[in-house]
Every structure is written in C-alpha cells, then in structure tokens.
Amino acid sequence: MSAPERVGVIGGGRMGAGIAQVLLGVGTTVHLVEAGDAAAAAARARVADGLEEAARRGKLDGGVDDALARLHMVDSPALLPADTGLVVEAVPEQVSVKLQVLRAAEEALGPDAVLATNTSSLSLTELAAALDRPARFVGMHFFNPVPASKLVEVVVAPETAPDVVETARAWTRRLGKTDVVVRDSPGFASSRLGVLLGLEAIRMLEEGVADAEAIDTAMELGYRHPMGPLRSTDLVGLDVRLAIAEYLTGTLGERFAPPQLLRDKVAAGELGRKSGRGFHTYS
Ligand code: NAI
C-alpha cells in the first residue's frame, strides 16, 4: 500500500479542526499547525472529539485510533514536511496573521505544493501579492460545521493557475462535498448573499416587522431555507458577522452597513450560540 498523502492544516480552531477531521476521515496524513503546547493540545482534542462524534454516527471508516495515528501536531508552518501536497490555512481573519503563516509555509514546501486559504472575506488578490508563488494559491472556503456542511467555495484569484483550481476542486469532491468556483471578489458568493439577507432580517427586527422566530420561520418554511437568517447569524457569531458587514460596506457599499441592533448586541456580549444568546437564546 502506498503511503497516505500529506496535507497540512494551519490553525486548529473551529474551522481548522473540522478540516483536519474530514481529511483524516478520507485516509490522509494531516500535519496540524498550532503555536504552543496548550493550543496544540486543545486543537488535537477538538479533532478527536469530532472524530468520535463521526464514529458514533457511523460516518468514520477505519476507527478513531487509526485516524488519530495519522494526525501530527507541529509548532510552526516552517516545520511542515516539504512533500506536503496541499496546505489549508485557517488562522484568524487578519491579513498580518494569514501572511505570516502563508509565507512560512511557502518556504517550507516544494514548488508544486498548493496553498489554500479558508478566509471567509479577505481579498485573495491582496494576500497573493505578498507571496512568492501566487499561481499556487487558491481559496478553499469551508463552512461551519465542516463535517456536516456540503459546500466548499473554490476562490480563484487572477494569478491562480488552472491546475491549482482543479486540485482544490478534486480535494473538495474527495471530501464528499460540492465545489462552486467563484472569482475573488468581496464576500465571494455565499457571504455576499447570506450576510445581506441576515442584515435585512436584523433591520426588520429593529423596525418591529416581526419577531425573530417569525422572521426565521418565514424563510425556513416559506423559502425552504434550512436555517433562517437570524438563526444563521447566531451560528456564525454576531461579532464575526459585524466584522464581515463592515468589510463589505467598505468594498461593496452602504447596502451592507451594519444595523445599530447588531452593534448593540455585540457590545453587550450577545454573540449568538457561542455566548448562549444572540437573536435567540440557547441553553
Ligand atoms: P478560531 O479562532 O476558532 O481558530 C483559529 C485558530 O488559529 C486558533 O486555534 C488559533 O490558536 C490558531 N492560530 C492563531 N495564530 C496562529 C499561528 N500563527 N499559527 C498557527 N495557528 C494559529 O477561528 P475559526 O472560526 O476557525 O476561523 C478561522 C478562519 O476560517 C478565519 O479566516 C475565518 O474567517 C474562516 N472561516 C470561519 C468560519 C466560521 O464559521 N467560524 C466559516 C468559514 C471560514
């Protein structure tokens, strides 16, 4: 049997741990980068929990121990093995942090390696400009929670090479997900539409058009959305949505201006599911 392929994941938070988990689930060897022992232990635990959950649901072939044996924690992207074919970065949404890890990974890897970013809003064109091999750089925008979601937006910057786009699409399909190819532009396809709908729902709540439950139910039952726009904002995090809305206001215009109610809730620490309360309450 040939050795499993190597994939690197940088950042093992909510998204990175999920990405590592689904890669392990298809037999890949994963090098997961987290800086420091405590962060590494927490990331490994997140991946292990996810694998156990998948196993309980009968969605993991080969067992948790086998998958975990292929997970290697590393301290820095500079320590990724040179023969790693694909690296997906999922560090916090800040240009400086992203560039630091992408450049370090680029130095460690061979010239044909594909570097992917899981950014949900940053300009790939801007990130690519700071890289030595912009042709090898592409967006792979996963959705939360990664194991359950079916979509990856493959985001193509002007200099991304066609074979790199195909590599990202092939990995997406191998993970059992559907790819959509989107030109690099603010908010890509999903956030641009999803955020706008969420903001309008918040404005409706401000205007007293209906309560949160009614607004969500209107879209869930009326338009067959699996989750209404306010519940979806709660899942993503109100702080995350606010930051994206501010960015989209700057790039696409005033129609993305965050409503005051969103700002007030973030200021009050009502961040959605993760804080127990957003537009709905969670136990
Ligand atoms: P998170 O905060 O849960 O995870 C970030 C992880 O990166 C943390 O574990 C942190 O310790 C680690 N990290 C920070 N600096 C690092 C460094 N220099 N080297 C290695 N690891 C480092 O964030 P989350 O939610 O996982 O988001 C990550 C990325 O995914 C962001 O770009 C975000 O925009 C994007 N994204 C998030 C979605 C979401 O629903 N949370 C959905 C789709 C994309």
Image (spheres, grey):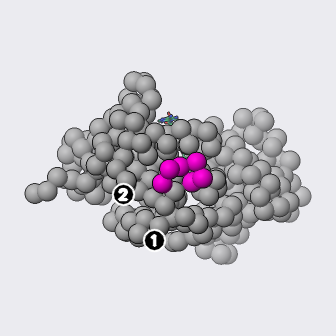
User: In this rendering, does residue 63 appear at all?
Assistant: yes
CB-based contact (under 8 Å), mark 2 and mark 1 = no
Q: Main secondary structure of the magenta part?
A: loop
Instruction: Say whether residue 280 is visible.
Output: no
Circle 1: residue type:
Pro
Tell me residue 254's x, y (percent): 86, 60
Q: Residue at x 49, y 44 (%)?
A: 102
Decide whether residue 130 is among the magenta residues.
yes
Q: Is mark 2 within 8 Å of ligand 1?
A: no
Which mark is on residue 112?
Answer: 2
Q: Where residue 2 appears, x then y in whole percent?
A: 14, 56
From the viewer's perspective, tell me whether residue 95 is left or right of residue 9. Answer: right
Q: Position of residue 73 (x, y in %)?
A: 33, 35
Q: Quadrant of the C terminus?
A: top right
Q: Which residue is mark 1?
A: 162
- The verdict on residue 189 being magenta is no
Q: Nearer the viewer, residue 162 or 195?
A: 162
Q: Is residue 24 left or right of residue 139?
A: left
Relative height, residue 241 to residue 268 (above, below): below
Other-residue count near label 2 (Cα within 10 Å), few / some / many at <14 / 14–19 / ≥20: some
Q: Which residue range is magenta in the image?
A: 128-133
Disc 1, SS: helix
